[in-house]
Amino acid sequence: MTAPDPMKGIRGVFAVTLILESIVVLLALLVLPKFGDGATPLGVAAILGVAVLMVVASGLQRRRWGLGLALGLQVATIACGVFVPALGVMGVVFALVWAGLVWFQRDVAEKMARGELPSQQVPDS
């Protein structure tokens, strides 16, 4: 029996986080008209584009560059704060979440390299 790959689970958390974040970004469309010039076709297209890219990126987390794409989308979300300031704030909040996720991934990778994960332990017989 092979040990489970902990990185597969972490990539799953990355994918789910992107889906949840895309929902938050799409909710910004509800408040977009309240911000004066924010409800322009450019503002709507930018917010929709970021949300769609997040959904696509969630399916690409198994790729080597998937995490980089997800982190780049955090910058795009913060930049959408030009259209909806609250979205910029949420972008910063999600950037902090992603910083924690990357820290967690590195911590698991270090423990895996040292053989300290519970799945790497030999059970006592």
Image: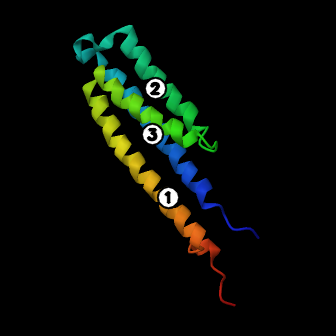
Q: Badge 2 is on which residue?
A: 50
Report crowding for label 1: few under 14, some 14 to 19, many 20 or more residues within 10 A (C-alpha): few
The location of residue 3, given as percent across then percent down, is: 69, 68
The location of residue 125, given as percent across then percent down, is: 69, 90
Marks 2 and 3 in Cβ contact (< 8 Å): no
Query: What secondary structure is found at the residue carrying circle 1?
Result: helix
Q: Badge 3 is on which residue?
A: 20
On the picture, is 69 further left or further right than 95?
Answer: right
The location of residue 57, given as percent across then percent down, is: 56, 35
> Which of the two labelled residues, at mark 2 and mark 1, occupies the earlier sequence position?
2
Disc number for residue 106: 1
Q: CA distance from mark 2 to mark 1?
A: 27 Å
Q: Is residue 102 above or below residue 74?
A: below
Query: What secondary structure is found at the residue carrying circle 2?
Result: helix
Which residue in the rendered view is the most extreme toward the bottom?
125
Q: Quadrant of residue 59?
A: top right
Q: Is residue 116 above or below residue 105?
A: below
Which residue is depicted at the point 32% across and 38% down? 92
Q: CA distance from mark 3 to mark 1?
A: 22 Å
